[in-house]
Structures are given as C-alpha cells and as structure tokens.
Amino acid sequence: MGAFKRSKNPSLLGAREKPLAKLVDIFCVFKIISNNRVGGDFIQSTNNKVFFFWKIGKYAYENQNNYDNIIEKLSVFCSYQFGDSRLYSRENIHMMRRFYLSFPVFYKKLMSFSWEQFKLLLMISDKKERYFYFYLSLLFKSNYQGTLEFILNDYYMRIW
C-alpha cells in the first residue's frame, strides 16, 4: 500500500484528489527545474534546493487537514521518489514547513541562502530575531559560517 490512499469511489474523489494532484505538481516542478533529470545535479544546486523545499513546506502546510500524518507521508513519498531518506526525514519535512511559514512568499533574495543557513535561522524561535539575522546575513552576503558567527556573537541582543 502506498503512502497516499485514493478512493476508487468517484463520489469520494473530490476533496482527496486535489491535494494528491498538488503533490504530483511538486514532482513536476522538481522534474522541470532539473531538466528532467531526477536527483544529483538538481539537489546540489542551492537555488533549486531552497525553492523545492519551500514548495514541499507549502504543500505540507496547506494539506495538514486533508491527510492524517502528512509529514510522515511526505517523508516516505519524497524519500521513495528522490532517493535520499536523510534529506527527507520527518524532521527535515517539519523544517520545510517552518520555512514556508516563516517566508510565505518566495522571492529572489531567498535563493541567495543555502538550505543549511535556513535551517540555522529556523532554529531561532523569535520571529524578529530570525528576520534580523536573515537581513544581516543578506546585507553582508554571508555564507553558513558567517550567519552562524552572527548568531553565536549575539548581534541581535547587542543592538537591541
């Protein structure tokens, strides 16, 4: 039995089919961006990875009421489709969902960060502090190490 169960009864397809179609859309976005090459080069590209993870987070958030255990099911589906079970663990799917909730509009500046930088920023619970480090890192064009240094040196508390 697959991670997602669809009803054979046509009268029951209505609400259940739409979220599954969106998941297929995620797979299509993945294939289009990667020029129909699944895996490898696509996931290595920071820009594509960040956009793709944002899409997965969006899907998880928008369909949390349509499926029981959506995070678990997405983890299984993505691990099967894209082959890296560590990258699509439940914890990472939760992080992708938080990423979408923190940045509900995807814009070009987000693509200048690596997924590791976002994971670092998402560990900060205070929204203002998270955005402060985001914009500080953006201003100084910091990599992961630079962002980590800003956070460890507690620049937010020094200024406020």
Image (cartoon, rainbow, N blue to C red):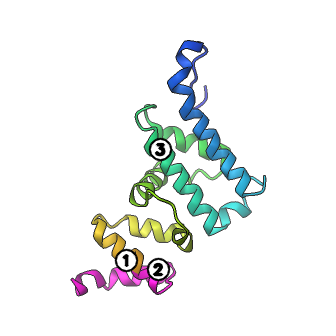
Query: Where's the N terminus, which quadrant?
Result: top right
Marks 2/1: CA–CA distance? 8 Å
Decide if residue 139 is on the left or right side of residue 3.
Answer: left
Q: Can residue 154 be seen in this view?
A: no
Q: Is residue 130 visible?
A: yes
Magenta part, dominant SS: helix
Marks 2/3: CA–CA distance? 27 Å
The kind of secondary structure element at disc 2 is helix
Q: Nearer the viewer, mark 2 or mark 3?
A: 2
> Where are the magenta residues, as a range?
136-160
Residue 93: percent from left, percent from top: 48, 50
Q: Earlier in the sequence, mark 2 or mark 1?
A: 1
Marks 1/3: CA–CA distance? 25 Å
Q: Which of marks 1 and 3 is nearer the N terminus?
A: 3
Residue plotted at (70% across, 61% down) = 42
Query: Where's the C terminus, which quadrant?
Result: bottom left
Residue 126: percent from left, percent from top: 27, 66
Q: Mark 2 points at which residue?
A: 138
Badge 1: residue crowd in 10 Å (few <14, some 14–19, many ≥20) = many
- Pick the residue in front: 96 or 140: 140
- Residue type at mark 3 is Ala
Decide if residue 85 is on the left or right side of residue 122.
Answer: right
- Residue type at mark 1 is Tyr
Badge 3: residue crowd in 10 Å (few <14, some 14–19, many ≥20) = many
- Residue 60's label in the rendered image is 3
The kind of secondary structure element at disc 3 is helix
Q: Name the residue under label 1.
A: 133
